[in-house]
Image: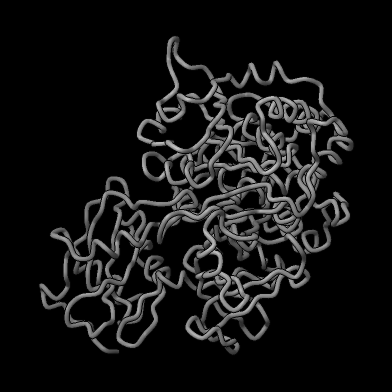
Amino acid sequence: MRVSAALVAPGGEPIALRLMTAVAPLDLDRSHWTLVDAARQQAARYGERVFHRFDDGTELSFAELDTATDALAGALAGLGVQPGDRVLALATNSKAFLLAMFATYKRRAIFTPINTELKGAFLEHQVRNSEPRVVVVDAELLALFDHVDTTGVDIEHTVVIGELPPGAELPTALARSARHGWDDVVAGAGMSGPGSPEVLDPEPSDICTIMYTSGTTGPSKGVLLPQAHCFLFGKGAADAVAITEDDHYFTCMPFFHANALFMQMAACLVAGASATVVKRFSASSWLDDVIACGATATNALGVMPEFIFRQPADPRDRSHRLTRVMAVPIAEEWGAAFEERFGVRLVQGFGMTEVNMVAYSDPADPVIAGCAGRVLDEFFDVRVVDPETDERLPVDAVGEIVVRPLQPFCFNVGYFKMPDKTVEAWRNLWFHTGDAGRFDAEGRLHFVDRLKDRIRRRGENISSYEIEQVLNEHPAVLESAAVGIRVEGAGGEEEVKACVVLAEGAGAPDPVALLDFCVERMPRYAVPRYIEYVPELDKTASGKVRKAALRETGVTAATWDRESVGYQLKRR
């Protein structure tokens, strides 16, 4: 996960000073930096006040988050869950999801949320890697296990959320486990509480979550996250976006992703804020949703903010309470215009699941595309280095962003059962993010691109992101992905290929006309040689395009080559 954020105030409200001085109310000594400690303190403070409201009509109060998960921790103990065991959750955003997570934490066990789009070999890899003792799964998602081989994985119990059709059985992958209904588990949970033998409150150093990477360049890796790491995710986001108990979040991203689970849910927990949670993002209903729930803050990631901005203008674009939008990436082409249209301020940042959020921009600063802001230097040491030598680079030089923690357990502690990948990522005792960036003269960190997504052509390093932003400005284009592909005669360098998804109802523009559009808006060395119109772009759960497959596909029968018509790029 990588993040930028944006804040906007209706009517141009000068919220910068408020954002700079607001402080999250939760005050915990670092020896208590766990989400369980946060839940206990906020339950005592807010009691039956609503913490999260879900789109199925259910609600979860601060008190219930604490007391119900004490009881459920006892139920998990009855299922044999011990400290360090994995509880795998294949479930959509729901009250049950959060209760299962906190109950797992209260057994000092490891909660393992899984992307609800996975199936077959993709799901099998994560099940085999995590080796869960218990699987918690939505009834509607059970079929995803149909082509999964769990031979050798000792899954003892399957807890099903929702109703199965009468007579329905568990998939073969889960058939050896004992089946339980979620409602039955909840109803049968005792009255365990703090100090009871079933409830084991964690330490900040406890590994509490395994969260899998997107797996864009190989098998997905299970990131080992300590309690303090997850707590700091929430605290950092709450502080950066100045979330207080008076705020209401709109969460439309999946809980199996760190942004929704830690930067939104945990931020609300730390700040004492409430939230409305829906199961999925919809650009067309986004404005309706934020108006209906009265949200004052929300997050957007990947293509989400651009898709929101490209919705038709609406007279209600400022008829909401929203003042802050945390979003990534922000492009120069629409960032300031987004703020003006919706009356909000955007705040950017940089982070990923492994390293936490290491930088946030100052909300008093104007929006600068790609500017992640200043490093949270109380917690992290961040450098930009030569990706080949790891030598530190000077101001404005683009290299790889590397990070190491300054506080214990506020950082990942490796990849589960992948020691080789852990060592590789920690080369020279710096965690290598794989992201290209730079520091400016003001000490602000700028995200440029994924290192593997940067294109090398004619001696120039080209940002695929910047090419895509130009293409996306074309009225016929919904979204695009630019990749570098190797072709004969290129001398080991790459040619630019643009994969383009057309907007609904738009006809495919003549490729020559599309190149003419690009020539006016980008350097000549960045203008694509190849164009291919595609029905969709395959993405990860965090909205990142799976570009490795596009690079491997290369030139196809459907690819248009500008050299086939003798298209010439004129020098200016």
Q: Residue at x 22, y 52 (%)?
A: 507
Q: Nearer the viewer, residue 255 or 15?
A: 255
In the rendered view, would you say 497 is above or below 110?
below
Q: Is residue 299 left or right of residue 555?
A: right
Say above or below: 343 vs 139. Answer: below
Asked which quadrant contains residue 335, the reply is bottom right
Asked if residue 194 lies left or right of residue 157, the reply is: right
Residue ID at (78%, 42%): 36
Where, quadrant-wise, is the C terminus in this rendering? bottom left
Horizontally, residue 340 falls left or right of residue 41, namely: left
Q: In this figure, what is the number of numbered marks? A: 0
Q: Is residue 289 visible?
A: yes
| Foreground pick, 85 / 16 | 85
- Image quarter of the N terminus: bottom right
Q: Is residue 330 visible?
A: no
From the top left corner, tell me how far across and down residue 222 is, in percent: 54, 52
